[in-house]
Image (cartoon, rainbow, N blue to C red):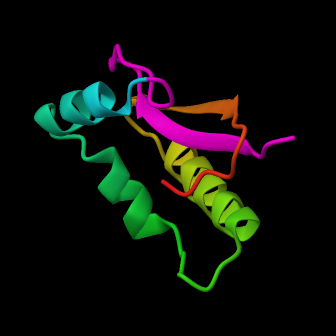
């Protein structure tokens, strides 16, 4: 069984992060959100982390972004993956 994958998206992005990442990313950067960069700044990851620990740390960062979401722009999304996710 795969690990649950979690990320954050904006409420107006019409693309699915998990199913159509390229379109999701293009929209996100075109709108100036740079959500991947935001997660990267908050998540405290390293190359030495296990896949499981990496996923947990990304979820911690996503939860923090959603908690301090003053403009109501962000929402947490999740899915089940067959393999570990390391995006």
Q: Which residue corresponds to the image point at 66% horizontal and 42% vertical from the top-left? A: 5
Residue 41, image quadrant: bottom left
Q: Is residue 57 left or right of residue 53?
A: left
Residue 74, image quadrant: top left
From the viewer's side, name the closer residue of 13 and 72. Answer: 13
Was residue 79 drawn as part of the magenta stretch in this picture?
no
Q: Which residue corresponds to the image point at 63% horizontal and 42% vertical from the top-left? A: 6
Was residue 7 drawn as part of the magenta stretch in this picture?
yes
From the viewer's side, name the closer residue of 62 and 7. Answer: 7
Give the prevailing secondary structure in the magenta stretch. Answer: loop
Q: Which residue corresponds to the image point at 41% horizontal and 21% vertical from the top-left? A: 11
Q: Which residue corresponds to the image point at 21% horizontal and 27% vertical from the top-left? A: 27
Using the image, determine if residue 66 lies above or below residue 43: above
Residue sitting at the far right:
1
Segment tinted magenta in the rendering:
1-19
Q: Residue 40: x and y, percent? A: 40, 64
Quadrant where the N terminus is found in the figure: top right
């Amino acid at each position: 069984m795969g690990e649950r994958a979690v990320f954050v998206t904006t409420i107006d992005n019409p693309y699915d992060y998990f199913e159509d990442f390229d379109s999701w990313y293009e929209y996100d950067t075109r709108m100036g959100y740079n959500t991947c960069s935001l997660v990267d700044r908050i998540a405290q990851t390293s190359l030495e982390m296990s896949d499981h620990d990496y996923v947990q740390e990304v979820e911690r960062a996503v939860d923090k972004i959603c908690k301090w979401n003053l403009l109501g722009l962000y929402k947490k999304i999740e899915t089940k993956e067959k393999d570990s996710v390391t995006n």
